[in-house]
Image: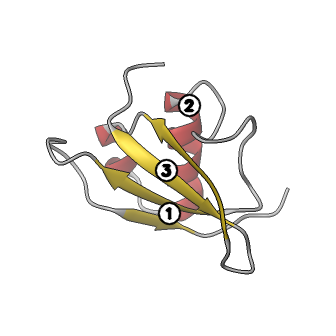
């Protein structure tokens, strides 16, 4: 995995905070526009795991905030997915 350039916050379906972690947010995430495709790209960029947990984080809503000096993108909110 590349050096982290974003903070990932995972929230339970109830809206309660679950986990946070540092990870890599590539420009490729912004070349696809479905949340599922963005989630898949984030997993590819981070060795198959959602930053902040040991797993894909399918049951969690994910909020991604890039670092101030990140040259691409904007904050993301990805809905939870099942499975």
Residue 68: image location, x then y, percent: 17, 48
Is 49 left, or right, of 67 in this rendering?
Answer: right
Residue under the point 66% across and 34% down: 49
Real-space Cα distance between discs 1 and 3? 18 Å
Q: Quarter of the image holding residue 12?
A: bottom right
Q: Is residue 41 above or below residue 31?
A: above
Mark nearer the N terminus (2 vs 1):
1
Real-space Cα distance between discs 2 and 1? 15 Å
- Residue ID for mark 1: 34
Residue 40: image location, x then y, percent: 59, 44
- Residue ID for mark 2: 44
Q: How many marks?
A: 3
Q: Is residue 15 above or below residue 37?
A: below
- Residue ID for mark 3: 8
Is 70 left, or right, of 50 in this rendering?
Answer: left
Q: Quarter of the image holding residue 17?
A: bottom right
Question: For the residues carrying marks 2 and 3, which lies nearer the camera in this image?
Answer: 3
Residue under the point 29% across and 40% down: 27
**Residue 25 numbered mark, or none:** none
Q: SS of the residue at dot 2?
A: helix
In the foreground, 48 or 22: 22
Residue under the point 41% across and 33% down: 24
In the foreground, 27 or 10: 10
């Amino acid at each position: 995995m590349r050096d982290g350039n974003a903070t990932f916050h995972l929230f339970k379906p109830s809206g309660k905070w679950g986990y946070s972690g540092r990870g890599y947010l590539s420009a490729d995430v912004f070349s696809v526009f479905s949340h599922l495709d963005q989630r898949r790209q984030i997993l590819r960029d981070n060795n198959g795991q959602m930053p902040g947990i040991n797993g894909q984080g399918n049951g969690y809503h994910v909020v991604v905030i890039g670092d101030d000096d990140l040259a691409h993108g904007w904050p993301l909110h990805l809905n939870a997915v099942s499975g």
